[in-house]
Amino acid sequence: MVYMPGDSPYCTPEQYKDCAEPALAALSSVEGTNCICRSSCNMTRYNKELSMVKIPSKTSARYLEKKFNRSEKYITDNILVLDVFFEALNYETIEQKKAYEVAGLLGDIGGQMGLFIGASILTILELFDYAYEVVKERLLDMLNREEEEESHGEDVSTCDPVVNHSESISHTVSVPLQTTLGTLEEIAC
């Protein structure tokens, strides 16, 4: 039997058999799945826990025996210590929200579009930069070839062949002379 709090009437076993069993069978059947009941908006649930030990101990049983003028066996069988308390002082709220709202959908679509448009513009600019660098290099190569061809034509006609190296070449070297090592010619050789 189920205890119903408040002043609700209690069902006798016959009433339970005649009324509750057919209703429970209809709810648990396959055809009874079209329930239109909505889930409750607020629900308070108190969890219970039971812990038992043999009480009282020998010392406290003797004390209670003297205090209540009862035997130790009577005290052991009939004394109860009951502590009622909250296990934890917290609560949990469960809220139901739409899985995906319109504002979130539009924000995600806009973000993706911005990402793709930005990436596309950046890619186009990088392609222009690459094309500019390629054209610049080719133009510089063409200009250098033309200058080399012009300079080769002039160098061939004005070059004097060198017969011997009798002409002295002067070049100033700013290397300090080392007196311990000798002259500069000795160091070079």
Image (cartoon, helix red, strand yellow):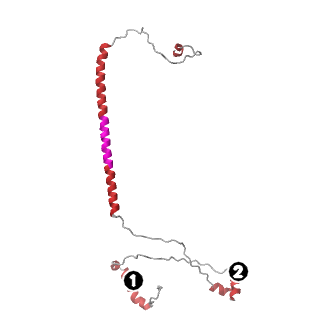
- The amino acid pointed to by label 2 is Thr
- State which tag comes first along the sequence, 2 or 1: 1
Q: Label 1 is placed on what type of residue?
A: Leu
* Residue 171 drawn at (x, y percent): 46, 15
Q: Position of residue 166 (x, y in %)?
A: 42, 8
**SS category of the residue bearing label 1:** helix
Q: Residue at x 68, y 83 (%)?
A: 61
Which residue lies under the disc numbered 2? 59
User: Is disc 2 placed on a helix, strand or loop?
Assistant: helix
C-alpha gap between disc 2 and disc 1: 53 Å
Residue in the picture at 33% in, 61% down = 105
* Few, some or many residues within 10 Å of mark 2 (<14, 14–19, 20+): few
Name the residue beneath numbered marker 1.
Answer: 24
Of 72 and 96, nearer the camera is 96
Q: Are marks 2 and 1 in contact (CB under 8 Å)?
A: no
When the figure is inspected, residue 95 is found, relative to residue 110, above or below; the finding is below
- What segment is highlighted magenta in the picture? 118-134
Give the answer, above or below, for where 25 lies relative to 104. Answer: below
Residue 169 in the image: state x and y as whole percent.
44, 12
Q: Nearer the viewer, residue 154 or 5?
A: 154
Q: Is residue 130 magenta?
A: yes
Q: Which mark is residue 153?
A: none
